[in-house]
Amino acid sequence: MSACCGIRSCPAVKDQKMPPKKKDKGNKKGKQKKNGAEHDMEEKFRKTVLEVEVLRDQLALRRDAARQAQAKGAELKERLLLLEQKLQQERHDKEDIYAEMIRKYKELQQESEMRTQDLEVAVKKLQEELGNCHQEMQQLHKKNQQITLEKNQAFAELQRTRERVEADCEKILHVTLDNLLSKLNAAKLGWTAQAISIHSGYKQRLLECGLNPLDI
């Protein structure tokens, strides 16, 4: 096809378009046939040239279309490559994110298990302390009951002792008072007899002096 690209300026075309004329002294009829054949040949050549031009234009269009298709193909290939790279990057990022999530999940799970174990240990310790406190409370309650009982017993004994002491004191007081009254009565009798004796003596002395005791 490259040999026919410049077909209008091609020397072969010019040679075909302008065939050499032969000098022939034939009759008029032969000359007319020759002119008709040349005309047909030129017409065929013109059609051939037109067909070649059309084919060349179609070939140029097809080349342009092929170049455009190739350019679009290269562009699509580049876009596809970019999309594939982006997809790989996204896949890589997703894998990284997934790995990070798995790592975080494992860490949280380990922390949760450790915290659960710590809580279980703490609960067990608190239960033991609660049991010890309950036992201590029971012992303290028993001790308080014992102290209360001993206190009540001591109070009752003290009350009995106080009542007994009060009774003894009252008895001693009555005995002492009775003894004191007896002594006072005895002293009173002695004082009365002594007073009568003294009074009789004074009366006798007054009479001896010629005085009437009743007038005094």
Image: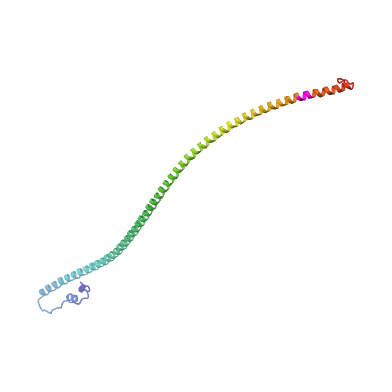
Q: Is residue 87 left or right of residue 53?
A: right
Query: Which quadrant would the C terminus be assigned to in this image?
Result: top right
Q: Residue at x 87, y 22 (%)?
A: 206
Name the residue: 48% across, 38% down: 142
Residue 193 among those drawn in magenta: yes
Quadrant (top left/top right/bottom left/bottom right) for the N terminus = bottom left
Q: Nearer the viewer, residue 83 or 114?
A: 114
Q: Is residue 111 left or right of residue 146?
A: left
- Rendering coords of residue 178 (x, y %): 68, 26
- From the image, give the main secondary structure of the stretch colored magenta: helix
Q: Is residue 130 magenta?
A: no
- 205 relative to 15, above or below: above
> Residue 196, located in which quarter of the rendered image?
top right
Q: Nearer the viewer, residue 71 or 195?
A: 195
Instruction: Please state the horizontal and vertical placement of residue 139, each as a whole percent of the image.
Output: 47, 40
User: Which residues are the magenta region?
Assistant: 190-194
Residue 209 appears in which quarter of the rendering?
top right
